[in-house]
Image (spheres, helix red, strand yellow):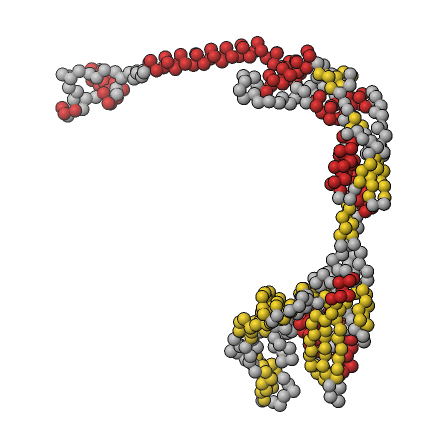
Amino acid sequence: MADHQENRERDSFSFRQQDSDPFDTPYPDAAYQKDASRPAAPPRSRPVKRQKHPRLYRLIVLAESIILIVIAGYWILFSAQYPAFRAKDAALRSSSFLQGITVDGLSIGGMTYEQALRVLEGSTEQEAPGLRIQIHLDDMIYLITDDDIPYARNLENVLDRAYAVGRRVTGNAAHTDETQFERRYLSLRQTAEQGLALSTSPGYRHQDVVVFVDKVASLIDRDPVDSELISVDFVKREFFFSDDESGRKLDKSALILAIETALDARRFDADLYATASTIPAAVTKVNLMNRFGSLTVRHLTVSSPAGDAYVRQMVEALNGVVIQSGNAFSLLDTLKARSCPLNTEDRIPSQLASLLFDTALSSGMTLISRQAFSAIDSTVPPGLDARLDENTDLRFRNDLNAPVCFLCYYTPRGSAGKTGDVTMELFGITKAPGESIELNAVQTSSLAAPAEDEYVENPLLPAGTRLITREASDGSIYTTYRVYLQNGREYRREIVCTSTYPALPRHIEYNH
């Protein structure tokens, strides 16, 4: 029984020992035992923040308080004056005329612009002054009546002036304490208290005077008419010209001034005198008859596979061509208009175009378009050639201030009927004694021939043969000048055109 009791006490002790915290049990090593001689550390507490610069915080709070007081003061002051400001602003924003304004004795205060205009237009009838101004010019008299220049009150100008009151303030407020807003309101109050009386006056519009003078000018002004070449007697080499006519030009500014001066002086029945200047014709018949003659003569020997008939037809298409001053000329259009066929397999069209180019440009014509040959031709000097086909034209313009006329004729040579001489002569106003013009073409650059040959297969050749049909040739660039001479000495030159003749490789035909 005692043993049983001892065992229970032992089991109970074991249970209590297991119930305790194992970390509270002292470690058996003396090195890890607590030192009873050292005092225990005090318990930890939360750190206390230290306040820095307390005087600075007090100054900030004081400044904020002062700002709030100032804002509150301004708000109180503005609240007290705001109703008055709104009343002033509403008065200035009104689109009506201010109170106190009268026009021709009628009050327009409170009216809009349209209402005032309608009331004043129906208030009185403006009597017409009875204009009877007479304009004397040559043997004609042009009468000005009230229908031509209506005479009416300057109502709109007066209303514009009235509407500006209180809206536009003149003067400089830079040296005063008043704002533009206050100055405008002061003008409004003064107008309401003192009043503003405006009145209209009869008058005219400058634009009505200008319209009347333009109408007179349309009856007087005319451009001059130049004399023109109307027919030619090729056998006798006689030329017939039309009459020239001088032009007229009214001095409109002087007439406008005279009319307005009379109206301002209320001379409603004045007699005024206008003038018109005479504009002579640039080309007169007398000048043409006295100075019309040969300007340039050029010759060219041609050979045509088509024969003399075709050459003669081409030459006759150019014979008698007249180009009036300022007009342009097209060689293609001229040949079509004269039903002349263009044989592009023949060199004659391009040779005649080259002759025409030299003749026209040597006489001072202005070149419009021209294209050089694709290669230098022995029959025409390089730089003086002009190609002609369905897509390439020769065009120039007559800027000589006088008409010109071409005379062309063909003289066969030999019995073959395919060779002859072409003569082309241009007639116009002859130059001053000693004056002449020539075309001078100068080579300005060269182009090296390609090193590689050009091969073309020709099945018509015998098998295994080669045939050189063209040797390689260098290319060149020519610049054509128009040279002005006085007694044979050059005094001026200008570039007319530039011609490029490309370098060509050797052409070889072959057959395998």
In the rendered view, would you say 413 is above or below 270?
A: below
Identify the image quadrant of residue 335: bottom right
Q: Quadrant of the N terminus?
A: top left
Q: Is residue 488 left or right of residue 159?
A: left
Residue toward you, 252 or 300: 252
Q: Is residue 131 left or right of residue 81?
A: right
Identify the image quadrant of residue 289: bottom right
Q: Is residue 305 left or right of residue 127?
A: left
Q: Position of residue 151 (x, y in %)?
A: 81, 30
Q: Is residue 353 left or right of residue 468?
A: right
Please say whether residue 35 is visible from this viewpoint: yes
Q: Position of residue 133 (x, y in %)?
A: 83, 35
Residue at image point 79% right, 29% down: 266
Q: Position of residue 188 (x, y in %)?
A: 66, 16
Residue at image point 76% right, 16% down: 107
In the rendered view, would you say 472 is above or below 400?
A: below
Please say whether residue 338 is visible from this viewpoint: no
In the rendered view, would you say 318 is above or below 100?
A: below
Residue at image point 75% right, 33% down: 261
Give the mark count. Answer: 0
Q: Position of residue 333 (x, y in %)?
A: 76, 68
Residue at image point 73% right, 19% down: 198
